[in-house]
Image (spheres, grey):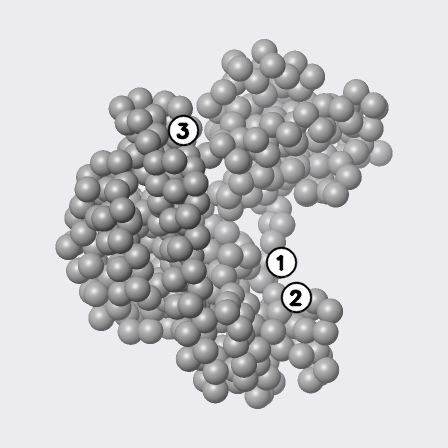
Amino acid sequence: MKKTVDIISLGCSKNLVDSEVLMGLFEANGFQCTHDSDDPQGDIVVVNTCGFINDAKEESINTILELAEAKKDGRIQKLFVMGCLSERYLAELEAEMPEVDKYYGKFNYRQLVTDLLAEESVKEGKRHVTTPRHYAYLKVSEGCDRHCAYCAIPLITGKHRSRPMEEILDEVRQLVADGTKEFQVIAQELTYYGVDIDGKQHIAELIERMADIPGVEWIRLHYAYPTHFPWDLLRVMHEKENVCKYLDIALQHISDNMLSRMQRHVTKAETYELIERIRREVPGIHLRTTLMVGFPGETDEDFEELKEFVRWARFERMGAFAYSEEEGTYSAEHYEDDVPEEVKQRRLDKLMRIQQNISAELEAEKVRQTLKVIIDRKEGDYYIGRTEFCSPEVDPEVLIPASEGELQIGAFYDVLMTASEEFDLYGTTINKKI
């Protein structure tokens, strides 16, 4: 009997990729793997933790505690922990939760398989993709050199390290051979790709070469940074039809006071110019951003500037969150967390109400348009799909009545948009699969 391993992934898609790599390694060495089981039990459970913000830390710790109880009850035999939380708090976790058999960090998790086999070397594995077969996340680098005042990521992941370009392209070819059509390109800081190799930004070259690989239908870009934006990337997005007109670029704030205190190394004027240029050079692009309220020192005037900016920018996709002090960061050590929690929440609610209205208006403009849609799944009475403007799990979806006929999961269809809600669209297919 093969030993069973259940890997539980918490946090972001970058963590998910690490879990998938580990699953492939386990399977190549004779283990049987599952992912995110509702009721983990059996031989081995591995928790891939997140340690980015307090809520994520709390979720990780609670998950470990629950599984420690399962181990105590005999429902699982061994419990291991890896990822961002244990990378940052290894000594504390070992002292507080000794029920865990062993802790691994963000970068040495491969050692887990070696330790279990008690051998010096293990067989290399093929990444086990856990997303629907037609799309996958593609991590092109790890770490970040930006050191924004509020962010703990550099404390966890260290300096930016780009993967070799040929290695990435080989992975894309392998994933295409396995049926992947759509790639979510991810990194802590996408636009910095290549700088650590030769001092130059190579993200445009990477995406252009990816786009030329036969079988790559959609490429979507996540987690760009506004400072020193690589303008050549816009040319690639404009020229290559399979590079989605979509860019995830976290802006955090707009007032010069906040941008300076956050150590974002960009100004209000430069941010406005950046958005104008992106929209001018890539007509029809959908921008996703993340904004923060309640950062230390944020005044009513700063927040008014932020609201005005959101109304002007009309982001197609926008998330926001309230500042949470993270130990070890510049802001935690140098600023007082002086915005009351009730003020943070009130500002967050106001900002999201503005965005909800904008989102509803922008989605309504798509009604009576025909858009290319990929089908992700069937759910109840509807097939659920996405346009090129929508990333999985976080963005609006397209609902197509199943009564219209059977659609193929992972296939593309031309869909006429017939109605809209605040975030989602409804449509009807107008042809066979593309």
In this rendering, would 250 be left or right of 404? Answer: left
| Quadrant that contains the C terminus | bottom right
Q: Nearer the viewer, residue 424 or 285?
A: 424
**Residue type indicated by callout 2:** Arg
Badge 2: how crowded within 10 Å, few (<14), some, or many (20+)?
A: some
Q: Say which label, 3 or 2, has the lower sequence index.
A: 3
Badge 1: how crowded within 10 Å, few (<14), some, or many (20+)?
A: few
Q: Say which label, 3 or 1, has the lower sequence index.
A: 1
Q: Which residue is mark 2?
A: 377
**Residue type indicated by callout 3:** Glu
Q: Which residue is mark 1?
A: 132
Distance Cα–Cα, label 3 vs label 1: 34 Å
Q: Position of residue 385 (x, y in %)?
A: 58, 70
Q: Secondary structure at mark 2?
A: strand
Which quadrant of the view contains residue 211? bottom left
In this rendering, would 181 be left or right of 42? Answer: left
Q: Position of residue 72 (x, y in %)?
A: 79, 20
Q: Position of residue 413 (x, y in %)?
A: 56, 79
Mark 2 touches mark 1? (CB < 8 Å): yes
Q: Can you tell which mark lies on residue 326?
A: 3
**Residue type indicated by callout 1:** Pro
Task: Judge whether residue 254 can be spotted in this image.
Answer: yes
Name the residue furthest left: 269
| In the rendered image, the vertical position of residue 179 relative to residue 57, given as above or below | below
In this rendering, would 111 be left or right of 27? Answer: left
